[in-house]
Amino acid sequence: MSAHPTAASPSPAPVHPNYRLPAGIGRAAWPAMGTTVVVCAPTERLAEAASQTRELFAIWEQALSRFRDDSELAQVNQQAGHSVPVSALFWDVLTTALAAARATDGLYDPTLGRQMLRIGYDRTFAAIAGGILAGPTARPLAGGGWQGMRLDPAARAVTLPVGVALDFGGIAKGMAVDAALAALTAAGIAPALVNAGGDLAANGTPEAGSWSVAVPGDRMIALYAGALATSGTDRRRWQQGATPRHHLIDPRTGEPVVTDVVAVTVAAPRCAQAEVAAKVALILGERAGRAWLRQHHLAGQCLRENGELWATAGWPAKEDQS
C-alpha cells in the first residue's frame, strides 16, 4: 500500500461524491449499480474515459444486479440446487468473493440475498427510501451459505445450496472500480479517478500533487495512489414496520449489524480489498475493528456515533488544505 492513504465520499447512497477537482481535470457522473458512478480525467480525454467506464459498469450491472430479473446473478439464484454455467466475469467476482469470505472467517458473506429480502431490501434503495415497509414474515437466518456452494472450475459452473441466494454487495462495486481504472490505465488515460458511491481508486496524481477527497467526519484528505472505500450505517436506512433498518447485514445474526460506529473508511491497494476491509471493521465494532485493521496492516478511520474519530497507523493526522 502506498505510504499516502486514499480518500473517498462517506456515503454509499446514490449521491454525488464530494471532492475538489484539480485544474485540468473534468468530471462525468451517471447512475449505475444502485449508486452514482463518477469518473475524473484530463478534460481532453474525459469523454473517452466516461464512455469506457460507463460501458464497463453497464456490463457489470447486467451480470451482477439482484434487482434485475434478467441478470446472471438472478438466474443463478433462481436455480439454487442445480449446476449453472456462468460467464468469466461472474466466475471472477464469485471466486474473489469466496476468497474474501474465507479470509474474513465469514464476516464478509456473499450469500446474504435471502437476509436482504427479509428486511425489505428487495428493490433498489431509491424505491424503498422514505416509505414504511411491512414487517418481516420470517425469523432471522444467520449467514454462512457460501460454505455449502459447489464450484466446477472445468465447466465454470456453480451450484448454490437450496435456500441460499447470492448478493455480492460492495465487493462487486469495488471490483468494477478496479476494472474500470485498469482499462483507463491501459488506454493511457491518467491521471484518472473512478468512484462508485464512495468506493474509489486513482491511477496517478494531477499536477496539483494529489486528489482532495472528503471522508466521514467532515474531513478532506489527500489521495496520492491506490484505493479507498467507506462502509457506513448512516445512509441507506428505512423503516420496516416499527423497526429501523439499514443495509449492512451481520452474517452472524442475519440482522442489520448493531455497532458502536457509524462509518469506517479503509485505504488499500485495490478498491475491492478496501471495501471488504471497511465492512468487516464496521461489523466488528470500534475495538475489535481497529485491532483487525492493525493485524492486516491497513490504514483506516472510524467515525463514532458521538462524532469522534479514531485512526490506525498510516492514516493522515491532518486535513488536506489544498
Image (cartoon, grey):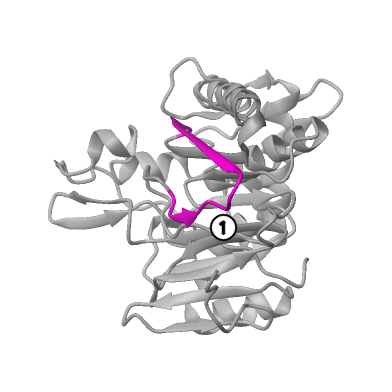
* Magenta stretch: includes residue 30: yes
Q: Residue at x 37, y 42 (%)?
A: 14
Q: Horizontal and vertical percent for residue 108? A: 58, 56
Q: Horizontal and vertical percent for residue 17? A: 44, 50
Q: Nearer the viewer, residue 85 or 60?
A: 60
Q: Horizontal and vertical percent for residue 247? A: 37, 51
Q: How many marks?
A: 1
* Magenta stretch: includes residue 242: no
Q: Quadrant of the N terminus?
A: bottom right
Relative side of 29 to 60, left or right: left
Q: Quadrant of residue 259?
A: bottom left
Q: Does residue 30 lie above or below 264 as drawn?
A: above
Q: How many other residues sit within 10 Å of disc 1, few (<14), some (14-19) or many (≥20)?
A: many
Q: Residue at x 33, y 61 (%)?
A: 234
Q: Secondary structure at mark 1?
A: strand
Q: Is residue 167 visible?
A: no
Q: Amino acid at mark 1?
A: Ala
Relative side of 190 to 122, left or right: right
Q: Does residue 124 lie above or below 201 as drawn?
A: above
Q: Does residue 46 lie above or below 120 as drawn?
A: above
Residue hosting label 1: 229
Residue sitting farthest toward the right: 154
Q: Quadrant of residue 219?
A: bottom left
Q: Residue at x 17, y 44 (%)?
A: 130
Q: Residue at x 34, y 80 (%)?
A: 307
Relative side of 32 to 244, left or right: right
Q: Quadrant of the C terminus?
A: bottom right
User: Where does the magenta region start and end?
Assistant: 17-33
